Image: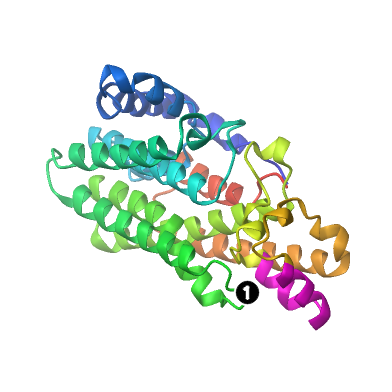
Amino acid sequence: MTSTLPSSLDGVSEQLDVSLQQVQDFIDNDLLSGSEAMKPLLDYASQFQGKRLRAMTVLLIANGFGKLKQQHVHVAAYVEMIHAATLMHDDLLDSASQRRSLDCVHVKWGSHAAVLLGDWMYSSAFSSATFMDDQTASRVLADATKRVCRGEIEQNLSRGNFNLSAEDYLSHIDGKTAALFDAAAFLAAHYAGASLKDCQSMSSFGLLAGRAFQIADDLLDVAGDEGVVGKSLGTDLGNGKLTLPLMRLRDNLSETEATQLEKMFGDEKSCDANLAAMWPEAWAITVEQTRGELRGYIDSAVSHLDCLPDSDYANVLRDITYFLGDREL
């Protein structure tokens, strides 16, 4: 597996870089313009920028329909702000210590600062969205954030449940992660003037791509290399969060072994457990199963991109979607 973005990006990188810089300028100059007292905290939080996949999704879909507009720059900024806010809250809930190889906001500045800054970032994005030409962005982003919060709440309430079903797990991640991809893709198509049918196809694409992204992230948590990934790993087992890989491992173990895994579940000392060494055969099957399910969701997501006209942008969007499942273990 590789963690580098697809080489097909090279063909559109110049235009995409310009648009991403416009997104960043809007975030820095408008959305993150707080008080002087907040500046050190905002400057620190601004370092937690990843690959900006949600913003790229908006820009690539807009270009794919051939109608990139200023509204797309704003929508891309809003989804990145909302995403950043959810990460601050999520890191605190998971007791994670690092993100992007830096101390998490709650580690550096305290839990109160992390919660309040996340809330402020939500509010900043929502407030700005109300000034767009129509209320579609406000409505869709508000609904998506409601789904994100519901997914986080339901997942938090299910901690310690070793018998969680796959259906409940998918419901949780469709909220906490996929909802924002769904909203980003729908709004990108909407502001490009796409038909309702095509907007719905983009919505389905976003939902399935977001689901795949979270499953890949959950696999990284139990099978990844912290030095490569750049954030705290092993937290799901220690925090009692039954993710798809842990669920499949549970089902692949003998009754005695599954009981042993259950005893580790929710024990902070288990964060450093080497599951591959403990149960190598079952672990190998588990990883293969999880990757297979992950690829199935990616294939389904990509099938919804058929409504996009053939272009370099559409091809890059397909490649990036496959990249979601090919991040470094």
Q: Which residue is the extreme one toward the top?
A: 36
Q: Which residue is the extreme one toward the bottom?
A: 255
Is residue 248 covered in magenta?
A: yes
Q: Nearer the viewer, residue 157 or 48?
A: 157
Q: Is residue 278 left or right of residue 327?
A: right
Q: Main secondary structure of the magenta part?
A: helix
The amino acid marked with disc number 1 is: Phe
Q: Residues within 10 Å of mark 1 (few under 14, many from 20)?
A: many
**Residue ID at (38%, 45%):** 61
Q: How far across and down, in percent of the image, does residue 202 sit?
A: 37, 57
Q: Nearer the viewer, residue 137 or 307?
A: 137
Q: Is residue 129 left or right of residue 183?
A: left
Residue underneath mark 1: 162
Residue 24 position (above or below residue 50) = above
Q: Is residue 151 left or right of residue 320?
A: left
Residue 39 position (above or below residue 284) = above
Q: Quadrant of residue 219?
A: bottom right
Q: How far across and down, in percent of the image, does residue 314 sit?
A: 46, 46
Residue 111 position (above or below residue 303) = above
Q: Nearer the viewer, residue 122 or 186?
A: 122
**Residue ID at (22%, 43%):** 126
Residue 59: tell me if it is visible: no
Q: Is residue 144 left or right of residue 251?
A: left
Q: How many circles with numbers are drawn on the protein? A: 1
Is residue 146 covered in magenta?
A: no
Q: How far across and down, in percent of the image, does residue 226 sit?
A: 70, 40
Q: Which residues are magenta?
A: 246-263
Residue 266 position (above or below residue 92) = below
Q: How far across and down, in percent of the image, does residue 254 sit?
A: 82, 80
